[in-house]
Structures are given as C-alpha cells and as structure tokens.
Amino acid sequence: MKYKMLVSDLDGTLLDNNSLVTPMVKAAIAEAETRGVRVVLSSGRCFVTMRQYEEALNLHTPGHYSIAFNGGYIYETDTHKPIFDRRLRPELSKEIICAIKSQKANLIVYVGSKLYYERLDESVNTYGRVTKMPLTPIDDFCEIEEEISKILITGDHEDLLAIYDNLKDFALGRCNTFFSSARLLEYCPLEAHKGLGVEFLCRYLDIDPGEVIAVGDYDNDISMIIRAGLGIAVQNAVSAVRDAADIITNSTNNDGAIREVIEKYLK
C-alpha cells in the first residue's frame, strides 16, 4: 500500500518530552514530503500554539493543513483560514459548565483563540505557561455569548477520572469527552474528534482513508487511529491506544518514533 497522508499527534508523539521537534524528526518529515506524502498535524491544542511547530517543520506553506481542537477546527496553515469549525452551542456550553462546577472542579474555556478562566489556581496557571496561551479572566463564563470551542478541566488524574465517571451519563449524546493527557479532561462538540477530522480532510482532499497513516499516544488519538488505513501507537502510548493500533513503534516520542514510521512505511 502506498500511503498519501501521514497524520500525527503532537504532544507525546511527534514532540519530545520537552515539547520540542528534534532534528531527526524534522529531517524525516522533510523526506516524507519530498516523496509526495502530505503531513498533517493533529492536536487537541489551539491552532495558535500549533503555528510554531508548523513553521519548524515547514508545514506552513500553501497546500498544508492542520487539525486543532481535537478535530473541531481544520485550517489552511499558510492563511490560517478554517475549512471546518465546530463549536458548542451557548445553551449547551452553559449546561456543561454548570455540570462541571457541580463537581467542585476548576475549568477553562476556549472561544477560538481566546482562553478564559474564572479562578486562577496552580493548575490553570501551569496550563497557560505550558501551552504559552494568554489567560483572560472573566467573572462568569455565562457572560460568554459566542459558541465555545472546547471546555477543559486540569488536575490530578484520579480526580479527573472521578469527574469523568460522574458526568458520563450527562455527556452521552451531547458532547465528546475524553482525556488528552493524564492531567487534561476535555469536553468538545459531538462533531469534534480526531477521527472525524481525518475523515473530513480526506473528503476535502479526495484521499481515501485507507491511504492514511495516523500516529498517536493518548485516548483522544484513538478515533483517528482506528479510522486510518494504518493506525500506529508510539511505544510510550497508553494501553488503550496500543490496543486500538495496528502497529506499535519500537521508538518512543523521545527516540524519534515519527522517524521510525516514515522510514518503515513511507518508502
């Protein structure tokens, strides 16, 4: 099978543990592009924080696309023009926010490229610092009139697991909820997950999903891994992702797992 598109998660997959693109990965992606393979970044991140990696990998030129907000936002990387943008309706957002607050959890809210918080604590501060996203204070999330891109809770994994379980029935059929890392629980539109993002981009570019390789490490990557022609888990992936994948790399994200994928399957 000749694959036409490589879709890669960022954190824990393409990036090393310092959130950096290593020279070996950069060289491998450049080689894949010279072979005619379209490389697409797919992340739970906001599109603003993906720009540095698109530029580092020379994926910000015409004809390139990225998937942000776990599939909720797909865009041209050179113009930043969205070709797909799905958000939570205001009334549903308010219900989700109230449900999360009932669990005594602190949350943050994305409206496009703006990140809002009501209460600044260590977890919210850390999230802003790590993602390099400016934090905008707001007295009450209910003041937000626009449609919301996604809602996040940050904190210890055990605490987030309890919230996930408590709100599982509430979220069913209303929104997508999943972990994007051990410390991040996300609530996104029903039409927003990475698998649907890959399917949309395949239709847009007239590429068969069977001609796609998708690579990831965490729960929010499973939907694209099972929809791609070849779904790959990196060596450091969590067990659910390893179980869903067709192949597990020998390398971790720190050892250049994406380079291994390109060298083995994109010759």
Image (cartoon, rainbow, N blue to C red):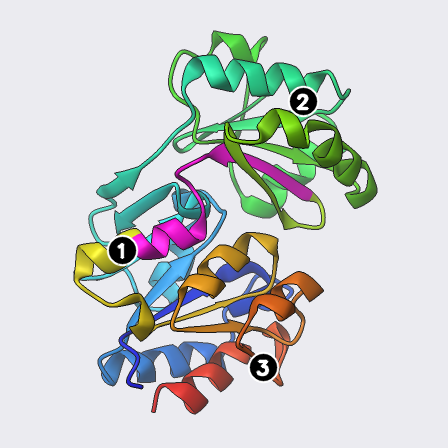
Which of these two is toward me, 106 or 3?
A: 3
Residue 100 bears which disc, if any? Answer: 2
**CA distance for labels 2 and 3:** 37 Å
- Membership of 185 in magenta stretch: yes
State left or right for residue 79 relative to residue 151. Answer: left
Circle 1: is it few (<14), some (14-19), or many (20+) Cα within 10 Å? many
Q: Amino acid at mark 2?
A: Ile
What range is drawn magenta here? 184-199
Query: Whole-percent x and y of residue 10?
Result: 50, 61
Relative to 72, is 102 on the left or the right?
right
Q: Verify CB contact (< 8 Å) between mark 2 and mark 3.
A: no
- Disc 2 is placed on an element classified as helix
Mark toward the start of the polypeptide (2 vs 3): 2
Which of 230 and 35 lies nearest the eye of the viewer?
230
Q: Which residue is mark 1?
A: 201
Q: How many marks?
A: 3
Q: Nearer the viewer, residue 261 or 222?
A: 222
Circle on res. 249: 3
Q: Is residue 246 visible?
A: yes
Q: CA distance from mark 2 to mark 1?
A: 32 Å
Q: Identity of the amino acid at label 1?
A: Leu
